[in-house]
Image (spheres, rainbow, N blue to C red):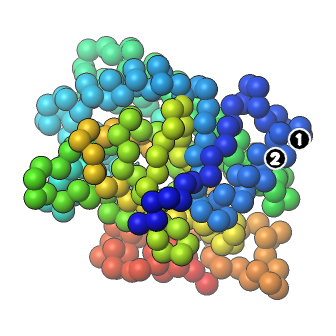
Amino acid sequence: MESNFKLPITNLALDQGPKSGKSSWIEARKFVTQAFEEYGCFLAVHDKFSSEVSDSIFLELQDLFDLPLEIKVQNTSETPLFGYYGPNPSIPLYESTSIEDATNLEAVERFTKLMWHSKNDHFCEMFHSYAKKVAELNEMVSKMVFESYGVEKYHESHVGSVTYLVRFTKYRVPEQNETNLGVVPHTDKNFITILHQNEANGLEVQLKNGSWISVDFPPSSLVIMAGDAFSAWSNGRVHSPFHRVNMNGKQIRYSIAQFSYCKKLVETPQDLVDEEHPLLYKPFDNFGLLRFISTDEGRKTENQLKAYCGI
Ligand SMILES: O=C(O)CCC(=O)C(=O)O
Ligand SMILES: [Fe+2]
């Protein structure tokens, strides 16, 4: 552990902050691109995610996870790793449930109805609005990187092909003699992940030199992280970092991860390929990558992205 190193942090408030074309936008664009390249992630502060907003969000999540198990398991999915995941012997602290297509109001309504039967408008409105705010942030940072690489002409079609999965995770506090590992080290398979948490820390990110750092989330902050699809799209320029969760504290941790997935093939723009940067990955299906990592072969491979679509 390299505990004294801190992830870079920036303010991404849309209203008073960066606007396309302005110098603050250009500065933020440079920061975001460099952070994705060097660390694969960074902290962003935004007033839309103030402590008051977060407190009510995490209270709702407490209610959600307090529902009986037979209700929670009803959230199933055809896509591996989506739906409900109860604690299992290898990661006993972990429990999560996901909403697919979370920026779509009907999808959030369907999930809410499945969990509560009767109406829970409050939950529905809160999380649909949360998903939309995070999606805006996701679009903004991807636009910055597309611009930095001179390929902004592809951004609109990229945004049109994105679908968002929101995953709520609860990590309970380990008992004596129990592992404190919340989630095993992994890279995300999607384009960009945006993470939010209650006051309980636990996220750890691996630097390129192999050391691990723990992430301290200041108030109103989110972690914005690149996944394997983004790294492949950028022809290896963007780094997709290994990360894990360790529960060292005495407080239950709740996190919300919003993943952007591409519905169309993930394809490196020709502009990012030249003699010095030969093409690293074939065009691939983002959900196909998810299916691959759930197979025996995929689980065993060290570099899953390379095994699935590497050249
Ligand atoms: O809970 C967190 O902070 C991280 C969760 C995570 O890495 C994931 O769900 O992919
Ligand atoms: Fe992750």
Residue type at numbered disc 1 = Ser
Which residue lies at the image location 42% right of the left edge and 38% below the top edge? 197
Q: Kindly identify which residue carries mark 2.
A: 27
Front residue of 292/36: it is: 36
Residue 310 falls left or right of residue 212: right
Asked if ligand 1 lies within 8 A of label 1, the reply is no
Does the rendering let one see residue 289? no
> Which of the pair 30/230 is nearer the observer?
30
- Camera-nearest residue between 287 and 272: 272
Q: Give the CA distance from mark 1 to mark 2.
A: 6 Å
Does any portion of residue 210 appear in the rendered image? yes
Relative image position of residue 181 (x, y in whole percent): 26, 58
Can you give x and y, in whole percent of width and height, for residue 69 in the image?
Answer: 14, 36
Where is 57 relative to 159, above or below?
above
Q: Secondary structure at mark 2?
A: helix
In the picture of the structure, the residue carrying the numbered disc 1 is 23
Residue at (69% x, 69% y) in the render: 237
Going by the numbered disc 2, the residue's amino acid type is: Glu
**Percent coordinates x, y for residue 48 in the rendering:** 59, 25
CB under 8 Å between callouts 1 and 2? yes
